[in-house]
Image (cartoon, rainbow, N blue to C red):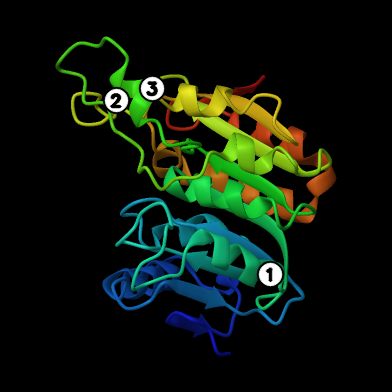
Amino acid sequence: MKLPFNIHIIRRAVASFSPEDLRGEIAGLNNACLHYGAAFFDAGHDETCVIFAGGLEKFSMLTIARHLECNVVCFQDNHRFWYSGSALLPPISEISQLLASGVFGNTRLLFGQSSGGYAALYASKYMEEAVTLAVSPQTFADRDVKTSFLRPAHIAVNIVDDDVVDLRDHLDDGSSAAIRHILVSASEVQNPITDFYWMDHLHAFRMHGSAGVQIGLIQSSTHAAVHSNKAAFAETLRDLWYDPDGHMDHISRLISQPRDENRSVTL
């Protein structure tokens, strides 16, 4: 497989690893994160789940694919968090076209958190039969908006990279039949906001009305909601894969269960 980036290929399904062996595999990939832009678990399946890591997550999000017997490809770029192109990976526009070409199989599920959620939503335009689940995604370059707000000096508001594409515009000419879930936490006070504050609600709810977008609210107090509730998200990905027609039931039922004080209500 000739690709424009370094990729580590494992010819087995993520679900075939024991929990201990999967942790070891992920640790090894994380140690090599400055060399590999992607890891591909080739299960010999025709269809694929695509995961985009958020900033500094490296390959750790592979843990939520623990129940998947399909192909899984995970992208990460520790040089440019919003996938705008680096020595490690080409920009998300090129990655999206590569995925759409079927080089890893037919993409049926896209997932990401934070900047990974941004990448998943961006790529979904070119794979509109896939279900997308984006947690706390950034959806536009927000410097002008955030610098116009009055706020207490102790709140550390993060600014999204100016290279980020406005997803509302990007998806506007997309298919309304696409299924795109955006989930955000009820608050970010436990980030803590004195260290970083993304204003996830701003990014999520401005996507209301965009093609195929459905928004859910997680009863959680952190930006990175997946990190404290990986088991529930792993179950959700599994059920979305095996029963995509029940997507709303799976998200509402699984992520709404009280786990680690995280609960979601679908709006």
Vertical order, 254 against 30 (above or below): above
Whichever of labels 1 and 3 marks the residue nearer the N terminus, that label is 1
Q: Residues within 10 Å of mark 3 (few under 14, many from 20)?
A: few
**223 and 263: which is toward the camera:** 223
Identity of the residue drawn at 62% across and 37% down: 169
Q: Is residue 112 visible?
A: yes
Identity of the residue drawn at 19% across and 24% down: 194
Q: Residue 95 appears at what percent x and percent y?
A: 56, 67
**262 and 155: which is toward the camera:** 155
Q: Is residue 243 left or right of residue 133?
A: right
Q: Residues within 10 Å of mark 2 (few under 14, many from 20)?
A: some
Q: Is residue 150 left or right of residue 138?
A: left
The Cα–Cα distance between marks 2 and 3, rounded to whole angstroms, is 23 Å
User: Circle 1 is placed at which residue position?
Assistant: 70
Whichever of labels 2 and 3 marks the residue nearer the N terminus, that label is 3
Identity of the residue drawn at 29% across and 62% down: 79
For badge 2, the amino acid type reads Gln
**159 and 19: which is toward the camera:** 159
Report which quarter residue 228 is drawn in. Answer: top left
The Cα–Cα distance between marks 2 and 1, rounded to whole angstroms, is 35 Å
Q: Residues within 10 Å of mark 1 (few under 14, many from 20)?
A: many
For badge 1, the amino acid type reads Cys
